[in-house]
Image (spheres, rainbow, N blue to C red):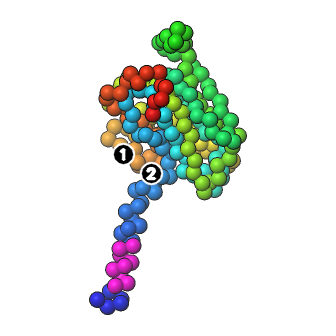
Amino acid sequence: MGLQSYLALARKSLLALGMSFLPLSSAWAHVTVHPQEAPAGSYTKLTFRVPHGCDGSPTKRLRVQIPEGFVSVKPMVHPLWNIETVKRPLKTPYESHGKMITETVAEVIWSGGSLPDDLMDEFSIRAKLPDRPGEVIPIPVIQECEKGVHRWIQVAQPGEDPKSLPEPAPLLKLTGGGGGQGHGHGSR
């Protein structure tokens, strides 16, 4: 094999390698939730990964909108960020530790920090998930930057590929057999 043939093959190999990372890079460009699957009815730590700011502008505020059916929601402390929760009444109150629980967290807001556009970070909550195995739940996230905003709220219609959406909501799939993990003590 001559030098020209070798260089052409090397270029093609590098191009193919680079192309293989394209689907991953577009997924990395969106806010995502981890894990992407969790047992229905379980207490689970959900981590929202923010991979960038808004076209060069740093993230200044992150709002995670908590879906119906999530209860016992607690945000995780994040150094240098303030945490605020917005509550809503529960459709069906329940008893916990001898106390009637009549409301739940509707939104968790991290603010007061600054996440540069070229860095990534993670923001976490713990929640008791709905006991609805097989359901895929969108979790809307609003990312507010110094200049601009990303509304990760889009949900694919039946037959539509969620990866085709410019700003898809993070998705959590509820799996079977996981409820009954106690009161969230020592949970995931």
- Depth check, mark 1 against mark 2: the one in front is 2
Q: Is residue 94 above or below residue 132?
A: above
**Mark closer to the chain start, 1 or 2:** 2
Question: Identity of the amino acid at label 1?
Answer: Asp
Magenta-span inclusion, residue 11 = yes
In the image shown, does 92 or 163 lie closer to the viewer?
A: 92
| Lateral position of residue 29 relative to residue 37, left or right | right
Quarter of the image holding residue 38? top left
* Residue 20, magenta (yes or no): no
Q: Which residue is mark 1?
A: 161
Name the residue at 57% across, 40% down: 123
Residue 1 in percent (x, y) is at 28, 89
* Residue located beneath label 2 in the image: 27
Q: Residues within 10 Å of mark 1 (few under 14, many from 20)?
A: few
Q: Residue at x 48, y 29 (%)?
A: 186
Residue bounds of the magenta highlight: 6-14
Q: Residues within 10 Å of mark 2 (few under 14, many from 20)?
A: few
Q: CA distance from mark 1 to mark 2?
A: 13 Å
Residue 95: percent from the left, percent from the top?
49, 10
